[in-house]
Image (cartoon, rainbow, N blue to C red):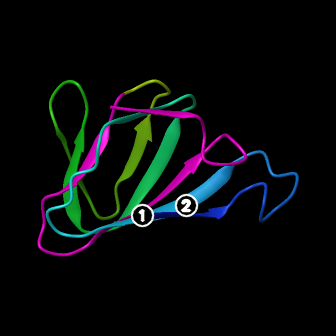
Amino acid sequence: WSRMVLTEETAPGIASSLGFSVFTPGTVTGMVSHDVEEIAYVLSGIGELHTDTEPVPISAEQAIHIPSGLWHAVANTGTGDLIMVFGFPHPAYPPTERR
């Protein structure tokens, strides 16, 4: 699950947003593509960032940059929760396409 914690609704006038996600073991999200870039930081756990090419391993204390328009998904490949903080240069969750 994901939750936006800092947006234009919670901080009027803000130009960017912040959220976090908790992926339980075995979770694989659907592919998404955002209109803006996304940055993320893995707080704990291990997993993979899936794109249209090869999966990229991700793990705790790793920062991730996802360019705008890149189709991506997250998979938790570990035995514990995969927890990530993410942000966008957009005042709310940005326009997003889903596959």
Q: How many numbered marks are there?
A: 2
Q: Magenta segment: does it hold 34?
A: no
Q: Which mark is residue 21?
A: 1
Quarter residue 27 falls in: bottom left
Q: Residue 5 carries which label?
A: none
* Disc 2 crowd, CA 10 A, few/some/many (<14, 14-19, 20+): some
Mark 1 residue element:
strand
User: Is the residue 87 above or below the residue 94 in the image?
Assistant: below
Which quadrant does the N terminus fall into? bottom left
- Direction from residue 49 to residue 32 in the image, left or right: right
What residue appears at the point 78 percent right and 54 percent down from the top-left corner?
8
Going by the numbered disc 2, the residue's amino acid type is Gly
Q: Residue furthest front?
A: 99
Counting from the top left corner in percent of width and height, residue 4 is at 59, 61
The stretch in magenta equals 71-99
Residue with the mark numbered 2? 19
Determine whether label 1 and label 2 are within 8 Å by CB.
yes
Going by the numbered disc 1, the residue's amino acid type is Ser
Which quadrant does the C terminus fall into? top left
Quarter residue 36 falls in: top right
- Direction from residue 28 to residue 72 in the image, left or right: right
